[in-house]
Image: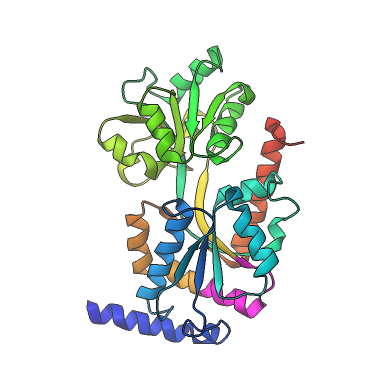
Amino acid sequence: MRRGRRSLGVALAAAALPWLACVPSPEARGWECLAPANAGGGWDLTCRSVGQVLSELGLAHGLVRTTNLPGAGGGVAFARTVAQRNDDPSVLIAASPSTTLRLAQGQYGDLTVDDVRWVGALGTEYGILAVAADAPWRSLDDLLAAWRRDPTSLVVSGGSAVAGQDHMKVLLLADRAGIDPLRIRYVPFDGGGEAMTALLGGFVDVFSGEASEVEGQVAAGRLRVLVALAPERMDGPLSSVPTARESGIDVTWVTWRGFYVPAGISDIQYQAWVDILSQVGQSSAWERARVVNRLQPFLLVGPDFAEFVKQQVDDFREMSREIGLIE
């Protein structure tokens, strides 16, 4: 088995030789993954997981450095990439729907989706709504009924800012259910952990987050997940949780984990990153990492991913307008 993994790494490294000639070698400069947040979050985990797989497959010929650059919900890293590293082919920057949502809402100033090049996504999580195990609401229909009676009666917590992705999940769900979304009370916390603690402490009524954030608490019997904002029921510990679509509410929230690169690199250098992320995404090493990190399968690279991202920005912009968050 060990020999097989070594052979696979050699084969993948050989296949990568054309693009290695286009990117500065690790010995000369090294490859860097830029995580636009502090250590421990989703972007940081994405960088470190992919960097480890690149090294394991022998594609990076050494460690891939992860640099944390928090600020403005990814805006600092985005702006620095555009202004200071626009032609640097050695850097890969982690992204997610939080990035596209902020671009859609103009929160990165004059910067747009076209100021970088979108390489690919390697996995995803799906949004969920959860309540305490002893809460009176046992289904999404119960929760919606309470909101219809009085949208201000319940308080929702989330790990993103107002109008961020945890808030947007709730706003979209309410809007599609015919409830005034701007009457829903939302309290932002600095991360999903704090938001969940507030729920378990009885300070809020509903938690808006990601599936991976709640699995441990569900297994411990402390939380009940009411709905998964997934296209279909998920694999794993939350496989019994119904989707919003099953309640007649067509809302999904796909929290993909992916990357962009500077816009000024050459087409050959861009294609090099597309090729290597394709190899990573199809490898057994990444499958193991994905399972450990509790990500669902989602592999989309190159122009298809770029088109997906641009469409998501357009969709988020329209959603934000419909809800009244932007003009």
Instruction: Give residue 128's position: percent from left, percent from top.
Output: 44, 36
Tell me where the magenta segment starts and ends, as one range.
Answer: 261-275
Location of residue 178 by image quarter? top right
The N terminus is located in which quarter? bottom left
Residue occupying the point 56% across, 41% down:
165
Of residues 145 and 21, the one nearer the viewer is 21
Q: In this view, does 292 lie to the left or right of 17?
A: left
Q: In this view, does 79 lie to the left or right of 53?
A: right
**Residue at image point 33% right, 41% down:** 215
Q: Nearer the viewer, residue 260 or 90?
A: 90
184 up-or-down from 218: above or below: above
Let me know if residue 264 is in the magenta part: yes
The residue positioned farthest toward the left in the image shown: 1
Q: Is residue 166 left or right of residue 285?
A: right
The question of residue 273 being in magenta is answered with yes
Q: Decide which of 189, 209 is in the foreground and name it.
A: 189
Question: Residue most toward the top?
Answer: 149
Return the x and y of residue 156 as percentages of the image width and height. Answer: 49, 27
Q: In the image, is residue 10 above or below residue 93?
A: below
Q: Between 69 and 207, which is closer to the camera in this rendering?
A: 69
Residue 23 visible to an observer of this rendering? yes
Residue 70, image x and y in percent? 54, 53
Query: Where does the image place residue 67, in percent across and percent down from the top left?
Result: 49, 64
Asked if one can make out residue 242 in the rendered structure from this viewpoint, the answer is no
Q: Name the chief secondary structure element in magenta.
A: helix
Res. 321 image quadrant: top right
Image quarter in which the C terminus is found = top right
Q: In which quarter of the image is residue 173?
A: top right
Q: Is residue 212 above or below residue 185?
A: below
